[in-house]
Image (tube, rainbow, N blue to C red):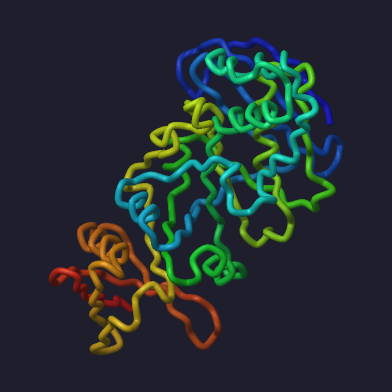
Amino acid sequence: MTIYLLIVMFCKFKGKMKKEYMYAEYISNEGKENQRIHKSYISSSSILNDIEYPKTTTPPKELLKFYNINENSVNALTNNYLWAANPLSFNDPFDCPRQLWSISSFTLETMKQLVDPKAHFLFSNDHESNREWFLKIRLASLGIISLNELQDKNQDIIWGYYTNQEGFSIKFDRHILIKQWGNPFRIEYLTPDDFDSFNIYELNTEELFPRFLRWSTQKKEVWENENEWRFIFSNLKIETLKMDAFPTERKKKYPTNAILELNLGLRFLPIENTVQFDDNSITVITDSIKHKNHNLLLTYLSDNQNIRTNHMSFKQDLKLHPRACKILKTRENRFLINYLE
């Protein structure tokens, strides 16, 4: 791999007025068919990341977010935000593993150079525990939103992975999300032996950003069916003592018209509380405590009839199919679902 020196340049930054920025890049798989060039453009107030792929790669027109039904997921939907997660908080320990960073390369001088001066008091020496703190603080400034490109061959797998068929998914218009946050990046699926690892010998702050980009866009090939794309934020403001970004920094707002449709999982409706009148309509009676989050989500859909809604169905071809429906709240904790087809 080859790392190019930083260059001071002038250009349009995110399409706005011209301003000075620093440029850094990191090349993975140099000279191979799957070579990627990870680029970061850093100004005093913004960071723009980009990846040059080995061939033209365009994000799909539609990207999906899959959710379990819980308080956090319903809150995100009803308040129009996606959570930009700390990569060290991922459920899968092999996704963005901290072990790919060589902490032996974290000298006291380098650590102090690469963190906010307000955090210098944490680093009186380069003991291993201080190096771990340093890594947590640096990576806490990252936020990752993971979305999926859905295909027929992986639909039932993805619903099972993320929702146990009981949650919901939101289909987004990628054009609107890109206007909000810039381009998403396609995950590269690899064997563990092909993962890039990183040290920080003689690096400055700007040179970290393209490495962050590479670190967070490689994943084990067992997850290839996910077809994952990620929006990556590199400069979240952090609470140093908590070693994490402020929650408000992680809530990335989007306009309601970014939602193309919302899909309820095959087993989303509590079957024991469902009364079916005919093939095209059912009534759902929710328990205000047991089904609190179902109640909130169905109420939201009843109040927002402009959001196209589907309920996933399972047919004799052994495939999941979206069935268009309208949801009406008829009284407290009671909903009428009318199927349109």
Please indicate whether residue 126 sits to the left or right of residue 313 in the image.
right
Please indicate whether residue 270 sits to the left or right of residue 181 in the image.
left
- Residue displayed at 58% across by 29% down: 137
Classify the position of the C terminus by image quarter. bottom left
- Single out the residue that lies furthest toward the left: 331
> Could you say where residue 311 lies in the image, as x and y percent from the top left?
38, 72
Classify the position of the N terminus by image quarter. top right
Instruction: Tally the numbered discs.
Output: 0
Image quarter of residue 195: top right
Looking at the image, residue 300 lies above or below residue 337? above
> Could you say where residue 245 lies in the image, as x and y percent from the top left?
48, 32
Image quarter of residue 287: bottom left
> Could you say where residue 3 lies in the image, as x and y percent from the top left?
79, 24
Front-most of residues 54 and 283: 283
Looking at the image, residue 23 lies above or below residue 246? above
- Residue displayed at 56% across by 27% down: 48
Front-most of residues 40 and 299: 299
- Residue displayed at 54% across by 49% down: 146
> Could you say where residue 211 lies in the image, as x and y percent from the top left?
70, 31
Looking at the image, residue 316 lies above or below residue 89? below
Looking at the image, residue 203 lies above or below residue 89? above
